[in-house]
Amino acid sequence: MTSDRNLIPDSGIFNYLSDSEKKDLGRHTTFMTFVRHDMLFMQNMPSDYIVYIIDGLVKIYKGGRGDRLICISLAGPGQFAGLSSAFGSDKYRNSSSAIENSSALMIRTRAVTDIIKSNGAFSAALFRILSKEVLDVSDKLVNFSVKQLPGRVADLLKYFSEDIFGSKDFTVPLTRQELAELIGTTKESLIRTLNEFKNDKIIDLDGKHIKILVPEIISMLSDLG
Amino acid sequence: MTSDRNLIPDSGIFNYLSDSEKKDLGRHTTFMTFVRHDMLFMQNMPSDYIVYIIDGLVKIYKGGRGDRLICISLAGPGQFAGLSSAFGSDKYRNSSSAIENSSALMIRTRAVTDIIKSNGAFSAALFRILSKEVLDVSDKLVNFSVKQLPGRVADLLKYFSEDIFGSKDFTVPLTRQELAELIGTTKESLIRTLNEFKNDKIIDLDGKHIKILVPEIISMLSDLG
DNA sequence: ATTTCTTGGTGATTTACATCATCATTATTC
DNA sequence: GAATAATGATGATGTAAATCACCAAGAAAT
């Protein structure tokens, strides 16, 4: 019976699918595992698959000039990667790689677009997801433009603390370089700002383990830019 | 009979609607005109309407710290404003105002979400639009982060020349301040860069009238950042 | 176990751009 | 048509953060 078990999970957005739709979609889905640094997809490849993260953490990024990367977003369990490329282009317009060892469902784009056309509730849910992506990237654009480093680093800390870990005490699975890419700066500048926070007793810092001591100041820095 | 004529145009994405759907949607639609500086919607207001631009040009922007604005995108005839806010939030997450005297259809968000659920082809078309928004804003984010001013100004000139006017010779309806907001800089820096281009005979500049003399160099500057 | 690579960290230097100040010119308003 | 405001333009100055150069510690490879 296990071989017959459908890959599509009974959770999140897939709750909007009927059993037969799940079965159909499952036929166009592959389960894959990735170790750190493995690519889920690459810029300019045909965007044939939408990726649904089951476990782990991946980054969606774009290569700038030289070796500089900009990380557009992270995606964890229950989130998608490659959605906008799949619907808005025939090629992936950015790259994605695993930060932690991860697993994901690779769902054929065509199968999803077929369901979109027939299942209004599922479609509406996807609209919400995609729209939030627009809003989030727009916010990031504005923050990059108006905030300087302390504000952006504060944003980053808030993001991990509130959105990702739900705790003031967490261990980031990213290198300093990767953290820098998330807020559009260099690893040196990120390290310096983080250490300033530490010296000012706003955070506690021990390698990848971060503890926010004074969240009020972090929020203030984030707000005032 | 004119009073019975439907507001919804027979063009673009609305071609995917049946006559009765158009009629329905028309009942939830208002035609409005705006003069320069009029607001189409404001950040934090309930996102009850999706705006479809009939004529003119509007900007979608966000206020940063102080009086600094960042322009996220422009929208002209046949384009939407407020889509992502309508689907992804209950409030507008950015503001929109008219750059040129403009006219637009204000379509009730609810009416659109209803159609999305029942009309797969229309829904798929909207997915394309929304996905392109994600891709465009993402590209802008990367460009802001990796390119310096000459590259970003070159991007701006290419955008007007290729995407908006389809000509190397055009008159921008925006002030220098507004141009600066589009590429995340100040009016002074934009003016200086534009004048450097002029002195280098890459462009011809006479007030708001711009002529690209050497598009190859503009492209190169845009590519190399 | 020793080399090699990656990552974290620090100081010195440079620079692109913002900021500030000011003025000319063109639009708007009354 | 004078008064007022908005815009375009330039120069001088300041500064945040990139860049460059380097080293130490840990991880991975041999």
Image (tube, coloured by chain):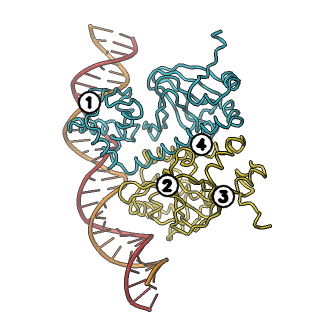
Chain colours: A cyan, B yellow, C orange, D red
SS under mark 2: loop
Instruction: Name the amino acid, label 1.
Output: Leu
**Comparing marks 2 and 1, which lies closer to the viewer?**
2
Q: Give the label on residue B45, or none.
A: 2
Q: Distance between the residues labelled 2 and 1?
A: 40 Å
**Comparing marks 1 and 3, which lies closer to the viewer?**
3
SS under mark 4: helix
Looking at the rendered structure, whether the residues under marks 1 and 3 are on a common chain is answered as: no
SS under mark 3: strand
Whether residues under marks 2 and 1 lie with C-beta atoms below 8 angstroms apart, the answer is no
Q: Which of B114 and A33 is in front in this view?
A: B114
- Check the residue under mark 3 and report the chain it is in: B
- Check the residue under mark 2 and report the chain it is in: B
Q: Quadrant of residue B122?
A: top right
- Residue annotated with mark 4: B131
In the image, residue A44 sits, relative to residue B53, either above or below, namely: above
Residue positioned 53% across, 68% down in the render: B36
Whether residues under marks 4 and 3 lie with C-beta atoms below 8 angstroms apart, the answer is no
**In the picture provided, is A198 more to the left or to the right than A109?**
left
State the image coordinates of residue D20 (x, y, percent, origin top left): 30, 39
Q: How far apart are marks 1 and 3 (CA)?
A: 55 Å
Tag 4 or tag 2, which sits nearer the N-term? 2
Looking at the rendered structure, whether the residues under marks 3 and 2 are on a common chain is answered as: yes
In the image, residue B152 sits, relative to residue B124, either above or below, namely: below
Instruction: Name the amino acid, label 3.
Output: Thr
- Residue annotated with mark 1: A205
- Check the residue under mark 4 and report the chain it is in: B
State the image coordinates of residue A156 (x, y, percent, origin top left): 37, 38
- Check the residue under mark 1 and report the chain it is in: A
Q: In which quarter of the image is residue A93?
A: top right
Question: Looking at the figure, which quarter contains the N terminus of chain A?
Answer: top right
SS under mark 1: strand
